[in-house]
Image: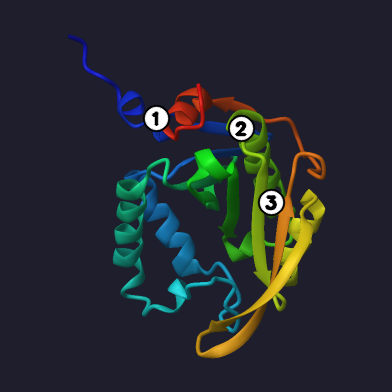
Amino acid sequence: MPSLTLEEIWPPFGLRVEAGDLTLSVLREGDVAALVGLVLEGIHDPDDMPFLFPWTRAPREELPANYVRYAGRVLAGQSPESTSLQLVVRRAGEVVGIQALEGEDVPVTRTMETGSWLVRRLHGQGIGTRMRQAVCALAFDHLGIERITSSAYLDNPSSMAVSRAVGYQPNGRRWIAREGEPAEQQSYVLTPGTFRRGEEIRVEGAAALREFLGLGG
């Protein structure tokens, strides 16, 4: 009996999305060193905290092992009930960040949430918008998703600008605790009717992934 490939055993590893010079693929163990290097280089202003969980505040010497543990938890926890596609973004072959697509009970809700980070030296070049457009096109056109949500703190105007550029619509605000202080978040929702597409995407492995996640063949 012929042996199975890793992509056949674990269909998320077979996903590949191309948009111009950007390529998105599911996080693998071999990607961790490059991603940790970017985190240590800096992915946001040290005086700000754009994330709901302030993981970048960990001591510098602890961040690498923490990221390995996180990657392992994401891999082990992947299921139709809890989906977390952590897509490694490469520009012209260079790892530059992460574009996530996540959701709970996605086969029922047909709703997922986007989140991302990009190495700080590349902020302001339109890469974040292109990453988001690519993953939203994947979700709507290839995974059968009907709604995509996102959120950002009010003091994170760049993230909100990306949401507006892609066509997300405001969907309420909420107050949450951030590092011991109250902080207000703006929520957004995107549907196919409001989606502002970017460059055409080329996708491999979506059919097998869709079946793996219980989203239909």
Q: Which amino acid does label 1 sit on?
A: Pro
Quadrant including the N terminus: top left
From the top left corner, tell me how far across and down residue 125 is, in percent. 74, 56
Residue at 77% in and 54% down: 168
Position of 217 compared to 147: left or right?
left
Q: 187 above or below 153? A: above
Q: Nearer the viewer, residue 139 or 158?
A: 139
Q: Give whichever of discs 2 and 3 has the lower sequence position.
A: 3
Q: Nearer the viewer, residue 97 or 206?
A: 206
Residue at 65% in and 59% down: 150
Disc 3 crowd, CA 10 A, few/some/many (<14, 14-19, 20+): some
From the top left corner, tell me how far across and down residue 155 is, in percent. 71, 78
Q: Any mark on residue 144, and which?
A: 2
> Do the CB atoms of the residues marked 2 and 3 lie less than 8 Å apart?
no
Location of residue 146 (image quadrant): top right
Position of 196 compared to 209: left or right?
right
